[in-house]
Image (spheres, rainbow, N blue to C red):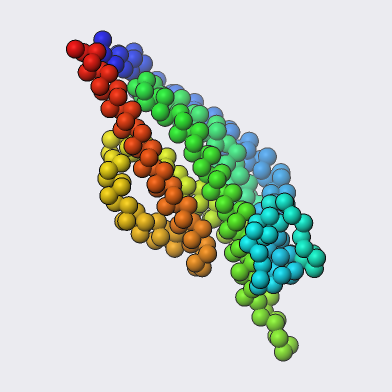
Amino acid sequence: MTRDERDEAEIEASRAPLMDHLVELRGRLLVCVVAFIAAFIVCFFFAAQIQLILIQPFQAAAAMHAAQGHHVNPFDLIAVTAGLKPVPDGGQEVVQLIATAPLEQLFTKMKIAGFGAVVLAFPVLAFQLYRFVAPGLYRNEKGAFLPFLLAAPVLFLLGGALVYFVMLPFVMWFSLGQQVVGDGVSVALLPKISEYLNLVTALLLAFGLCFQLPVVMTLLGLAGLISSKFMAEGRRYAIVAVVVVAAVVTPPDPISQLMLAVPLVLLYEISIWCVRLIELRRKKADDADALAAT
């Protein structure tokens, strides 16, 4: 019996009536909903602490701006945000954010709790998804699908770390540099808490999803929809698309756009090598099957 015949037999043995699939889907959706609600309650309870954590890049940028003005050292700003270096002398400044509506802070906490619940409950959601689709996958597809479920949150966290420790401090430092003071006029940066946190969550989602590029491209290569040769030949068009995406999802300044565009180009190159490895493994498996058939 060949490998394909063994896979077909395994899938045929796991077939179930439509009603059984619907019952299983209902149960797994129920588990996902319960996990999300539990994570939402936990995140809402700690919403104030989460807010303080998300405001820390702004606080570090304000401290560095007060201490060094427009001549801040980029590595010092990153180190201060990460807590690796103390704030320089003269940089102790209180960050002020405002709420202009009676229930604005409540709705902001709910948004934070919802965002945090998705992140916190993702392992449960991903595991339920895998358990639902696993019976319909070939044995080699099961072995390939699970690593992608593990790689997706890791890449999302890498994108989030780039936002938190690098991009946000520079964006807020740049914004603080646009303040105007003089001749009885003061134009100070006093962002609304909801608008600031909307910016943070939007950037985290944008970078986290864009960092899924290797996962998406590798899955397409695994399905045989794209090839490494096609990706290599279309590199120039991919770079243009990356620049356009970076310009759309980031604030309108070249530093932010470069912070997203450069990692995405590197991730695209990594995707080419991942697809190439899949092609090599597939060729070896086909050669082994051909040899066994003879």
Q: Residue 168 in the image: x percent, y percent? A: 60, 59
Up/down of 255 relative to 143, above or below: below
Which residue lies at the image location 67% right of the left edge and 45% below the top edge? 44
In which image quadrant can residue 283 be found?
top left
Q: Nearer the viewer, residue 18 or 284?
A: 284
Q: Residue at x 61, y 69 (%)?
A: 174
Give residue 227's position: percent from left, percent from top.
Answer: 28, 40
Q: Is 15 drawn above or below residue 30 in the view shown?
A: above
Q: Quadrant of residue 33?
A: top right
Give the position of the C terminus as an image quadrant: top left
Determine the residue located farthest toward the top in the rendered image: 1
Along the viewing direction, whichever of 12 and 44 lies nearer the viewer: 12
Q: Is residue 2 visible?
A: yes
Q: Position of residue 80 (x, y in %)?
A: 71, 56
- Left or right: residue 98 versus residue 210 is right
Left or right: where does residue 23 sit relative to residue 48?
A: left
Q: Look at the image and tell me in which quarter the N terminus lies.
A: top left
Q: Residue at x 31, y 46 (%)?
A: 231
In the displayed structure, does residue 124 sit left or right of residue 54? left
> Residue at left 27%, top 18%?
288
